[in-house]
Image (cartoon, rainbow, N blue to C red):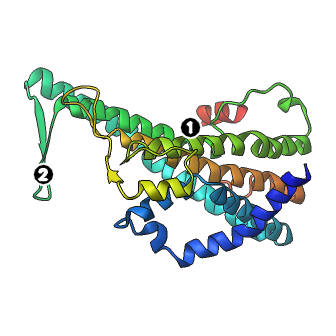
Amino acid sequence: MLDGILWVVTNIGTAFYNFGYAVTHPGLWLNWADTEAIMRFAYYGGSTQLFFVILTAFLVLTAVGLWRNSVLWGYVRGAEWFGNTVGRFFAWAGLLMVLQQTLIVFLQRIFLVSEISIGPFGTVFTKDLSWYAEELKLYNAMIVALCCAYTFIQGGHVRVDLVYGSVSRRTKKIIDMIGCLIFMIPVLTLTWMYAWFFLWRHLITPKISASDKIEMLMRKARIVKWNVETIGFSPNGFNAYFLFKVLIMAFVVMMLIQAMAFFYRNLLELIEGEDADGRYHDEDVLGDDLPEHFHESF
């Protein structure tokens, strides 16, 4: 037990040095012309060192925010603005899906066209209609991955309410805070770990895994090559499935930002009282009295 506590404290202490060293030596992990830099980036992106850098930043921000509540309110406002903006933008991918599917049906069934060429800037991009049909999956994935944080901010996620609705306001805030720390953030951390190495196994060769040590990756760097996944489910189908793995990473990052914002919002509302409830919350307005009443009732 004591060894575990000492290990955590030591890693928190070294997080300041690790962060400072990474920032002052960007070429060691951002200069991708160097294969060793690629391997360092892949290793440290899913490492204990990165975890403790983020954890230490969370602890420092929390400590400063308890001293100056305005700091935490600034984070909450910035995080929610970011989630809302990204979500509202990529929600339009739903309309794009409908328009593209309609175009595909008309071109294929009525005009008997087999491929589409696009070249507004002089470079012609030609793909089979089946490629554009399978590309619709990417739009759907963008909505799921990039609008999830937006849905969470707006309170549109599904709650499993066993006792939440019948407890006091103070207890609700505590439940939300504990839920963030015990369930939401740990699950997102595990998802990041699996998704990070899942992504890199489809970008480079030889493949890497979470169990590889940095020394092993430095040896693999001598023979590393880019091997971006371009295999589709059909001969002429969509062949950029690595983008789905990038979207998983984007989903985790955005939800982690919102998990911290949700924790801080509940903490601040608990400290400052009922007058702080919903402060700075940019809630969508449906624009119709009946739907508004239905939305408020749930």
- Residue holding disc 1: 288
- Image x and y of residue 168, in percent: 92, 39
Name the one closer to the observer, 216 or 100.
Answer: 216
Quadrant (top left, top right, bottom left, bottom right) of the C terminus: top right
- Image x and y of residue 245, in percent: 44, 42
* Secondary element at image label 2: loop
- Image x and y of residue 244, in percent: 41, 40
Name the one closer to the observer, 176 or 55.
Answer: 55
Q: CA distance from mark 2 to mark 1?
A: 42 Å
Residue 20 image-quadrant placement: bottom right
Q: In the rendered structure, which amino acid carries the disc numbered 2?
A: Gly
- Image x and y of residue 129, in percent: 17, 31
Q: In the rendered structure, which amino acid carries the disc numbered 1?
A: Asp
Residue at the limit of the structure toward the left, as seen here: 112
Label 2: few (<14), some or many (≥20) within 10 Å?
Answer: few
Q: Is residue 126 above or below residue 122?
A: above
- Residue holding disc 2: 119
Residue at the limit of the structure toward the top, as seen here: 109
Closer mark to the observer between disc 2 and disc 1: 2
Q: Indicate left or right for 241 with 259 as reference.
A: left
Name the one closer to the observer, 137 or 279.
Answer: 137
- Determine the residue positioned at 35% across, 54% down: 223
